[in-house]
Amino acid sequence: NAGVTQTPKFQVLKTGQSMTLQCAQDMNHNSMYWYRQDPGMGLRLIYYSASEGTTDKGEVPNGYNVSRLNKREFSLRLESAAPSQTSVYFCASRPGLVSYNEQFFGPGTRLTVL
Amino acid sequence: DQQVKQNSPSLSVQEGRISILNCDYTNSMFDYFLWYKKYPAEGPTFLISISSIKDKNEDGRFTVFLNKSAKHLSLHIVPSQPGDSAVYFCAASAYRGSTLGRLYFGRGTQLTVWP
């Protein structure tokens, strides 16, 4: 049982390049989330997917797109990377919306945009 | 607009003493509160939670207190150990309304426990 996995662990991009961050969970969770963490800013929600087939914007969605590929996988895409998107990205999952329980986080992807 | 605030960026405590981490929130719809711990180069891990129907929840050395009237919660760690040194995030969620299921995080407090 690997929990939440993220690939890649590290990535360096040039401004304007595109890339997709992958996230998968093996806990049969319904809800999945993408956050970014910047120094002194805590964790800010980019997008989330309450259940397979649905996605919603979070606090800082601009410059990102997401795909809930199936129940296990939730990917985050940067179409044209900018230096402001240099950050650590965390994916998380949670059993569902209608119960009191925590989110489980992956190990993160450290992205640098030059 | 920061709905969850951790006003102390850092806290330094001697091993064996009590660590108290504080958190304030502004949204009265929040009814579930969590603390996460984060080590460098790792993802946050869940530590303890409390629902708004309680004012205290305890798990071993960790106790969370909730004061709804003051919109304030705190995490007590007793006794503190060097392995507790990490960034602690306070988070809140509402199970009513359009924010259903989302977590709102504070900016974190870096706890350092020294021998």
Image: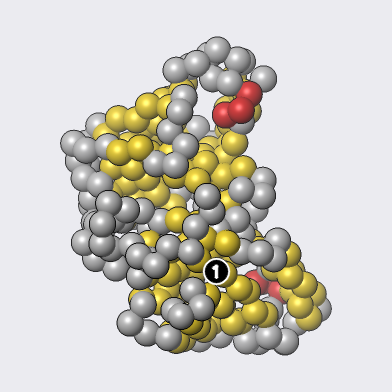
* Residue B40 relative to residue A19: left or right: right
Give the residue at mark 1. B24
Q: Position of residue A58 (x, y in %)?
A: 39, 41
Give the colour scheme of this rendering.
secondary structure
Above or below residue A72? Residue B9 is below
Residue at 26% across / 62% down in the picture? B96
Above or below residue A90? Residue B103 is below
What is the chain identity of the residue bearing mark 1?
Answer: B
Residue at 49% across / 57% down in the picture? B3
Q: Position of residue B75 (x, y in %)?
A: 56, 77
Residue farthest top in this picture: A16
Give B99 or A92, whichever is nearer the viewer. Answer: B99
Secondary structure state at the residue bearing disc 1:
strand
Quadrant position of the C terminus of chain B in the picture: bottom right
Give the quadrant of residue B85: bottom right
Q: Position of residue B87 (x, y in %)?
A: 63, 61
* Residue B61 relative to residue A52: left or right: right
Give B44 or B108, whichever is nearer the viewer. Answer: B108
Residue at 46% across / 80% down in the picture? B69
The amino acid marked with disc number 1 is Asp
Residue neighbourhood size for the residue with mark 1, other residues' Cα within 10 Å, grouped as few (<14), some (14–19), many (≥20)? many
